[in-house]
Amino acid sequence: MMLVSNLFFLNCTNYILSGELTTLKSLKLQTGIFENLEPLKKLTNLENLSLTSCKFYKNNNSNFFPYMKHLTRLEIIMCPSLKSDGMQRFSELPNLKCLQLSYLTLQTFSFVTSLMNLNALSLVGFQLSDEDVNSLLTVNSLYNIQLFKCNSLHDRTIQNLIMNDVNKKIICM
């Protein structure tokens, strides 16, 4: 029996996720069209998940999070089907340490405050409010914050970010 620990799929569709890959540790799905991500429930040993330019037919695309207790790194880039309400399920990822979100349609970032073990957060291409940024600072475990192309921030908020905690590494571009 062959054990697969890392898998990368480009231009894939639903049939890729129908297999029994329960030992998989790392999965990268790129430019895929899926009915939903429900089959990811089977990947209970997954530690790293990357979704880039994926489209989903159904809205129940976050129901797999409770099954991913080992997930430590999550990257979601340009997946317009994933919305803020699905991000609330991130709180069900107790071991999540690194989160990268890029060019998504999110209305709120309040879900970040429920990620008590999150160490690194990268947000790219968002309209962040001053309140959003202040809520990020309340996550004590978060020491690396990267904000790229988040040009809605006021200078005062950026100063607060920098002055808030000398132990946090904060990058604003």
Image: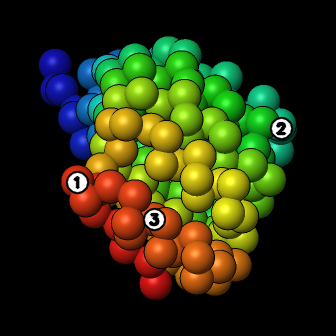
Residue at 74% from the left image edge and 49% from the top image edge: 108
Q: Residues within 10 Å of mark 3 (few under 14, many from 20)?
A: many
User: Residue 91, which numbered label?
Assistant: none
Mark 1 belongs to which amino acid? Asn
Residue displayed at 78% across by 36% down: 85
Is the C-beta separation of discs 2 and 1 under 8 Å?
no
61 relative to 11 in the view: left or right:
right
Mark 1 burial class by Cα count in 10 Å: few <14, some 14-19, many 20+: few
* Residue at mark 1: 167
Question: Which x, y percent locates residue 104?
Answer: 68, 61
Sequence-wise first label, 3 or 1:
3
Question: What secondary structure is found at the residue carrying circle 2?
Answer: loop
Labelled pair 3, 2 in contact (Cβ < 8 Å): no
Q: Quadrant of residue 62?
A: top right
How far across and how far down the image is residue 113, in percent?
A: 55, 35
Q: Is residue 17 left or right of residue 166?
A: right
Q: Quadrant of residue 100?
A: bottom left
The reply to whether residue 12 is visible in this rendering is: no
Amino acid type for the residue under numbered disc 3: Leu
Instruction: Report which residue position mark 2 lands on.
Output: 58
Residue under numbered circle 3:
161
Q: CA distance from mark 3 to mark 1?
A: 11 Å
Q: Residue 68, percent across and down?
A: 44, 21
As drawn, is 85 to the left or to the right of 147? right
Label 1's element? loop
Callout 3: helix, strand or loop?
helix
Q: Is residue 73 above or below residue 156?
A: above
